[in-house]
Amino acid sequence: MNRISLKKAIAGVCIAAVLGVGAGCIYSEIQSGTQNPQVKTESTQRKAANAELSGARNTYVVQAAKKSGSAVVGITTKVYQQDMFNRAVFVGEGVGSGVLIDKEGHIVTNAHVVADATTVSVSLSNGETVNGTVIGKDTSTDLAVVQINPPPDIEPITIGDSDTLQVGEPAIAIGNPLGLEFKGSVTSGVISALARTVDESGQRFPLIQTDAAINPGNSGGALLNADGDLIGINSSKIAREGVEGMGFSIPINEAKPIIESIIKNGYVIRPYLGVWAIDKETAAQNNLAFSGNGLAIVQLDSDGPAANAGLRRGDIITSINGKDVTTSMELRQVMDTLKPGDTVTITAKRNGQTFTKDVTLSQTSK
């Protein structure tokens, strides 16, 4: 009987965010040493995969795993730390998951999985290990894209529609919990909730909540529906004592424009408004009270689009292009639908009086 010795250090990092340069709470998984126990030989696995199943055994989970499991890969990065002499010292390997999304060899994963690496090692479902190039990443959404030479014998995953999800429908997670020794692990559950907020200050869009087991190493892996279509990129898990069955995934519809921008540009192009604003609850915590709903401007870029259009510190933004904004996330969501050069109509209040300003958005830096 194999004994598995697993030493892992899981470090949590939470980066504060401002509009246009946001970031979320992320964690990295560092694996020390090398363990690779073989639960089954490859021939046994192939035999199991080709076995004929009865109708009772051939469940939607089995069918989804067969359809899409091969598109889920392992991603390994070398992790270094600075010693007392400011030298880079190798301390282990960071291990996560990724999803092959097209025939050009693009793989979607989490930004915290690739960290600062420019190249990574990609473990394919056919047993090969190949080098991958990090095309780009976006820390504010915890998404990244890696590219490999497209494997001819592995079909990319089918992209689903996360906007059609219903609470209670089946959900299937595939990834590499605790490292590559458990690669391709399949867990199932349901969609527990939609539009979840985990980090109001930095989260750019609501997340999918599922009770399908998501553990360290699953980050960047696939969340599937019962048809085996990709509906989310697994990103984080609430890991507190006594809390179980709460995993979170980035909805694929929200992720697609981020992924497309990274593939095209190497980074995400976002419009820039030039304001730092807080909601009513946060304002009250800082002894700044205002009536009604909206976001209070607490700071402006003096040469930014909002200031140039006539907005001032203390103004309360209530809507953009007719869409109400009452939280920082709602503001980020509206901004993510826009592009540099767009002119938007901002409705705001000043000293109890409502007014509008037309603001032409500029572009954030990388």
Image: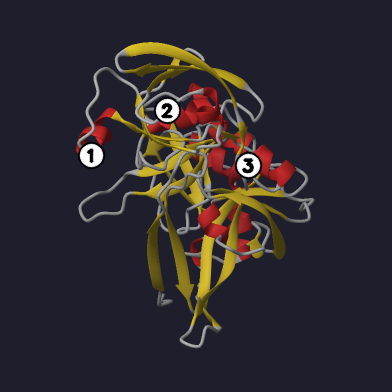
Work out whether mark 1 precedes mark 2 in sequence or the reverse, and give the earlier one: 1
The image quadrant that residue 326 belongs to is top left
- Write down the residue under mark 2: 312
Q: Position of residue 233 (x, y in %)?
A: 52, 43
User: Which element is circle 1 on?
Assistant: loop
From the viewer's perspective, is 281 left or right of 174?
left
Q: CA distance from mark 2 to mark 3?
A: 28 Å
Q: Amino acid at mark 2?
A: Arg
Closer to us: 46 or 260:
260
From the viewer's perspective, is 38 left or right of 105?
left
The answer to whether residue 180 shows anywhere in this view is: no
From the viewer's perspective, is 327 left or right of 151?
left
Work out whether mark 1 precedes mark 3 in sequence or the reverse, and give the earlier one: 3
Q: Amino acid at mark 1?
A: Asn
Q: CA distance from mark 1 to mark 2?
A: 19 Å
Query: For the residue carrying disc 2, how many other residues have a C-alpha within 10 Å: few (<14), some (14-19), or many (20+)?
Result: some
- Write down the residue under mark 1: 286
Q: Is residue 261 above or below residue 27?
A: above
Q: What residue is shown at x 55% (from left), y 35% (from top)? A: 304
User: Which element is circle 3 on?
Assistant: loop
Q: What residue is shown at x 36% (from left), y 27% (from top)? A: 168
Query: For the residue carrying disc 1, how many other residues have a C-alpha within 10 Å: few (<14), some (14-19), or many (20+)?
Result: few
State the mark number for residue 268. 3
Disc 1 versus disc 3: nearer the observer: 1
Work out whether mark 2 precedes mark 3 in sequence or the reverse, and give the earlier one: 3
Q: Amino acid at mark 3?
A: Val
